[in-house]
Image (spheres, rainbow, N blue to C red):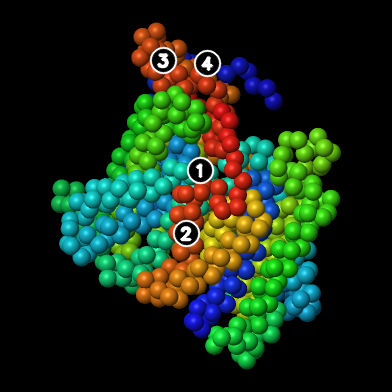
Amino acid sequence: MRMSKPLRISAGGPAHWTLRVIGFGAIAYIAISPMFRTLKPNEYGQLADIAILALAALSLNLLVGFTGQISIGHSAFFGLGAYTTAILIHTHHWSPGWTFPVSAALCFVVGVLVGIPALRLTGVYLSLVTLALAELFPALVKNFSDLTGGSRGIQSIRYNPPSWTGLSTRSTADRTEWLYWLALAMLVIGYVVVRNLVKSRVGRAMIAVRDNTTAAAVMGVHVAVVKTVVFGISAALAGLAGCVFVLRQTQANPENVNYTILGAIIFLVIMVVGGTASLLGPIVGAFVYYRVDQFTRDIPQKEYLPGFVHDFLEGRPNLATVVFATLLILLMFVAPFGIVGLARRIGRRFVVVVPRPPTSREAAEAVPEALEAIPSTPLESAVPTSPSQGGT
Amino acid sequence: MHRFLQYLFDGLSSGSIYALIALGLVLVYRGTGHLNFAQGEMAMVSAYMAWWLNTNWLSIWLAVAVSMVFGFLLGAVTEVVIIRPIGRRSPFAVGVAAIGLLLGLNALAPFVWKSPVPEAFESLFPSKPEDFARIGGATWRYENIGVLVTTLVVAILLYLLFQRTKLGLAMRAVASNPASAPLAGIKTGQVLMVSWGLSAAVGAVGGAMVASLNHNVNSGMMLAIFFSATAAAMLGGFDSLVGAVVAGIALGVIENMAAGYAPGLIGQDLKGSVSLLIILVVLLFRPTGLFGAKKVERV
């Protein structure tokens, strides 16, 4: 079916800004909607979980989507952040808020340290080394039981809402509500950090490194610095997600899925489902992942299914995972660049945003932009979505 | 001395299993350049197949043979139906699809066979408590010897396949130059399909060996093994069959030695991480592994 010609609007023009404002407004509305609608019980908790997953996937997207460094080990940074917060609160009686920057800083340092050896590795090799990290983390936690409580874990980690929020410190519902706002704040911070990085000079350097490392180095990008710093920032954001997660769980335990290799895979899947190298992707991905996961878990209890389906499902475990894995593989057929990528492709049939030609002065100043003139032929990374299309 | 021998014997059998899975990984990587994340899970599903056939109809060895055929079909169908079409769109998506397979197959086996708990698996080798040889004060169990011998037989058969048969020649041609191989009249598609099938069939042997040593099948049995096997494949250079076998067995031995001699520091908890640390160090100095071919990238 051939559509009529798409509407062409210029980037940065009034029409483009209207689109942006509408899009941003819709997202902001969803994010703060709990303030003016009645929530079902535990809905705050679910929203908080979604925000946490989104932040973890966002951190991964910075590394994988925009810099082309594959990590299957972000559960380790997530866990490191979580455990730092847990230990500081439980053993050293810190106020929870102050543990956040400490956790993030620690994760940043560890991320840079991991990033340095990772400089020599690409593709499959890098994914295996990061995977080693994910394998190592729970084992280390169990091993250093003096510090971490071993397999017993650390209990009763709480973050009571401060008095200015007007929320009661006694009620669990109010504590969960506070955690949602906290998770949302962290997500917004993470989003702004990633967005500003990606849209800046550093971002262009990252994308150049992703699409062709050798060419980027030739063009004057300091590949080693870009890779390690991005690794550090990504680790710090994953750690922040871990901090909120451990407060939401109120306990830290090495057996928790999100600290194991499976957690790292879940973050990766969320990122891919939402859209690799898309700013909004991780948030959309986390939302969809969470809802699909919940839905598939409840399938055996659905009343409207015919009897023989119930008979078939009787005594069979893991239905949720089977369905989810099938959907994931199908998605790779339909939309390798995730839901946001698919939406963008469909959207392009109706509206095309034409990049504004740079004025002569800008073109002279922005040396790294010359990289964009190179036709991007992604070798391994295969993330050809042009970031200049506007991430939002 | 007898402690050393004991750790060596134990290490040889776990190393053999790493080698079997690593062989499968190398077969796929040489063909299509993908890391098959689902290799271990394909082996696990094949082991379930062998268990199912064995409990219902067949003797254990026959059941394993049939499960190898099943594994071959599973691998070949995966390549044709999932890997190839997705690979045409994006190589990154193939990795994700393979991770999807890892999750899906891991969940599928207990789902299909309605068994959330481990199921008893008949041993392939004599495995009564008194079935062992005593060498230098250490015990070498017959089942451990059996696993090692099976691995070596599989490795030799693969070597013969690659060096002495037309199919092997075609597979080598596709591995060394995928662009020119079709010009020499090689049907690349078929070769890749067979590579994946073969890889999963070798994996099925590995799965049966693991189940036989554990005396049970369960869906989680290949996860840790898969990671160590990937480390072995990488240590061996990822495109070298000899490398996979040597590195697999070596890693098994090193892991057991490390866990045995440093029980407080490493112990059983961190055993699997030892191999991953080793490859980290090796990759820093030799990014192509011990036996791998150097690749020069042009811009």
**Figure check: A71 above or below B74:** above
Of the two numbered discs 3 and 1 in the rendering, the one whose residue sits closer to the viewer: 1
Q: Quadrant of residue A376?
A: top right
Chain hosting mark 3: A
Disc number for residue A8: 4
Alpha-carbon span between mark 3 and mark 1: 40 Å
Residue underneath mark 3: A13
* Residue B71 coordinates in the image, percent (x, y): 73, 62
Q: Are marks 4 and 2 on the same chain?
A: no
Q: Is residue A100 left or right of residue B11?
A: left
Of the two numbered discs 4 and 2 in the rendering, the one whose residue sits closer to the viewer: 2
Instruction: Determine the residue positioned at 41% across, 47% down.
Output: A117
Label tally = 4
Instruction: Determine the residue positioned at 59% across, 72% down.
Output: B12
Alpha-carbon span between mark 2 and mark 1: 18 Å
- Look at the numbered discs 4 and 3 and tell me whether their residues touch, using CB distance below 8 Å: no
For the view shown, which residue lies furthest in the left direction?
A: A163
